[in-house]
Amino acid sequence: MTTNKVIQTVLAPQAVGPYSQAIRAEGLVFVSGQIPLDPGSGELIEGDIAAQTRQCIRNIQAILEVANSSLAQIVKTTVFLADINDFAAMNAAYAEFFPNDPPARSAFQVAALPKGARIEIEAVAAL
């Protein structure tokens, strides 16, 4: 039987709905989609898609650290963009965090994201 553990930290934005920041199960950490919210204010950060991408990844990083994992242990991410034309700028900012052996990734344009965000990123990491 699988034992799931809820991962929660004040160093990342609180969930904006009935879900956990992450779940640790079977040697993996499943991080819920992170939009570019400032953890302190709970508001979307100002800035272009590069700044928003960095904030999403910093939020994921904070959650993974509490789960005893790290960005280096991410095996898969999914990126949701409000505008696929932001792909190149998102990709450049994303690459700053994964200079070597980046995780598998999918990226999609979606109709809309919570709170009017331009980007959301979810991740799966090993422990």
Image (cartoon, rainbow, N blue to C red):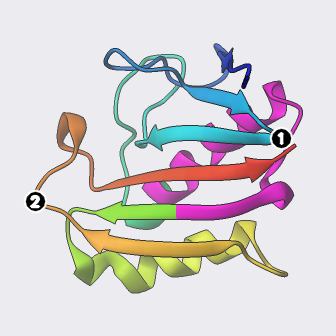
Does residue 65 appear left or right of residue 7 in this picture?
A: right
Q: Give the labeled residue for mark 2.
A: 111
Does residue 91 appear left or right of residue 109 in this picture?
A: right
Disc 2 vs disc 1: Cβ atoms closer than 8 Å? no
Does residue 127 appear left or right of residue 51 in this picture?
A: right
| Residue 64: x %, y % from top left | 75, 37
The residue that appears at 86% across and 41% down in the rendered structure is 69
Q: Toward the viewer: 58 or 29?
A: 29
Q: Is 38 rendered above or below residue 34?
A: above
| Residue 96: x %, y % from top left | 70, 72
Considering every residue shown, the one lying at the far left of the view is 111
Q: Toward the viewer: 76 or 25?
A: 25
| Residue 3: x %, y % from top left | 74, 19
Q: Quadrant of residue 72?
A: bottom right
Which secondary structure lies at badge 2?
Answer: loop
Q: Is 120 rendered above or below residue 80?
A: above
Q: Any magenta on residue 76?
A: yes
Of the residues shown, which amino acid type is indicated by label 1? Gly
Q: Which residues are magenta?
A: 52-77
Q: Quadrant of residue 102?
A: bottom right
**How far separated are the C-alphas under marks 2 and 1?**
33 Å
The residue that appears at 10% across and 59% down in the rendered structure is 111
Of the residues shown, which amino acid type is indicated by label 2? Ala
Estimate how packed mark 2 is, as few (under 14), some (14 to 19) or many (20 or more) residues with alpha carbons within 10 Å.
few
Which secondary structure lies at badge 1?
Answer: loop
The residue that appears at 47% across and 53% down in the rendered structure is 121
The residue that appears at 60% across and 29% down in the rendered structure is 22
Main SS class of the magenta portion in the image: helix
| Residue 117: x %, y % from top left | 26, 46
Q: Give the labeled residue for mark 1.
A: 27
Estimate how packed mark 1 is, as few (under 14), some (14 to 19) or many (20 or more) residues with alpha carbons within 10 Å.
few
Number of the front mark, 2 or 1? 1
